[in-house]
């Protein structure tokens, strides 16, 4: 079983991680208006899945704001989606308060099926691990970073390089 840490304490991830070069699993997540979103909604786009434990924490807040800023310099062929187990209403409130418009937020709160399918669900917390996954327009994982210590930020430079290579 894969693990991450939270302030040095080991936490276990459920599911098998997605491997670069393989097709990513389909998913159904809830948009802020409770409508379903699936992988098919992003077909033909470079999809950047930014998973965070909760938007209402300082590191997650900082990370999604950073990706929102970076999105302005990216091609319109790129979609950045932040996924958490926060309720869709909380995500919408956070986006409004943070002025985040270039990053879409989706929720895995119902069944945590996304987290399990991608090997990112933290068993002990029922939250998602911090990760950045870059998916090609045809649904293949091109870049993956699961941040080992969830209180740390991801490697933005590596993620942005992978995005720009595909866009």
Image (cartoon, rainbow, N blue to C red):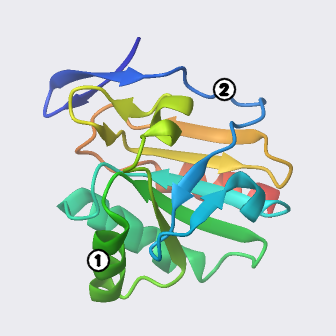
Choose mark 1 or mark 2, whichever is in front: 1
Relative to 144, 74 lies left or right? right
Distance, label 1 to label 2, CA atoms, is 31 Å
Q: Position of residue 55 (x, y in %)?
A: 28, 63
> Which quarter of the rendering shows the C terminus?
bottom right
Find residue 15 and report its horizontal and vertical position in percent: 49, 22
Task: Judge whether 67 appears above or below 136 on screen.
Answer: below
Ranked by sequence position, the earlier of labels 1 and 2 is 2
Among the 4 quarters of the image, the one containing residue 151: top left
Q: Which residue is mark 1?
A: 94
87 relative to 71, above or below: above
- Give the structural element (helix, strand or loop) at label 1: helix
Estimate the x, y position of residue 102 in percent, counting from the top left.
54, 81
Q: Which mark is residue 19?
A: 2
Residue 85: give its label. Answer: none
Give x and y (percent) for residue 60.
Answer: 30, 59
Name the residue located 55 percent from the left edge and 25 percent from the top edge.
17
Q: Residues within 10 Å of mark 2 (few under 14, many from 20)?
A: some
């Amino acid at each position: 079983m894969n693990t991450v840490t939270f302030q040095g304490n080991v936490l276990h991830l459920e599911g098998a991680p997605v491997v670069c070069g393989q097709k990513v699993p389909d998913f159904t997540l809830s948009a802020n208006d409770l409508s379903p979103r699936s992988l098919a909604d992003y077909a033909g786009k470079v999809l950047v899945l930014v998973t965070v434990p909760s938007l209402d924490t300082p590191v997650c807040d900082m990370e999604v704001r950073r990706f929102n800023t970076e999105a302005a310099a990216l091609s319109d062929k790129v979609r950045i989606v932040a996924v958490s187990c926060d309720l869709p209403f909380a995500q919408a409130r956070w986006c409004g308060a943070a002025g985040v418009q270039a990053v879409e937020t989706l929720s895995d709160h119902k069944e945590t099926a996304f987290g399990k399918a991608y090997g990112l669900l933290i068993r002990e917390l029922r939250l998602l691990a911090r990760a950045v996954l870059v998916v090609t327009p045809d649904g293949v994982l091109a870049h993956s970073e699961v941040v080992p210590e969830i209180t740390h930020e991801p490697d933005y430079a590596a993620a942005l390089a992978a995005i720009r290579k595909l866009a």
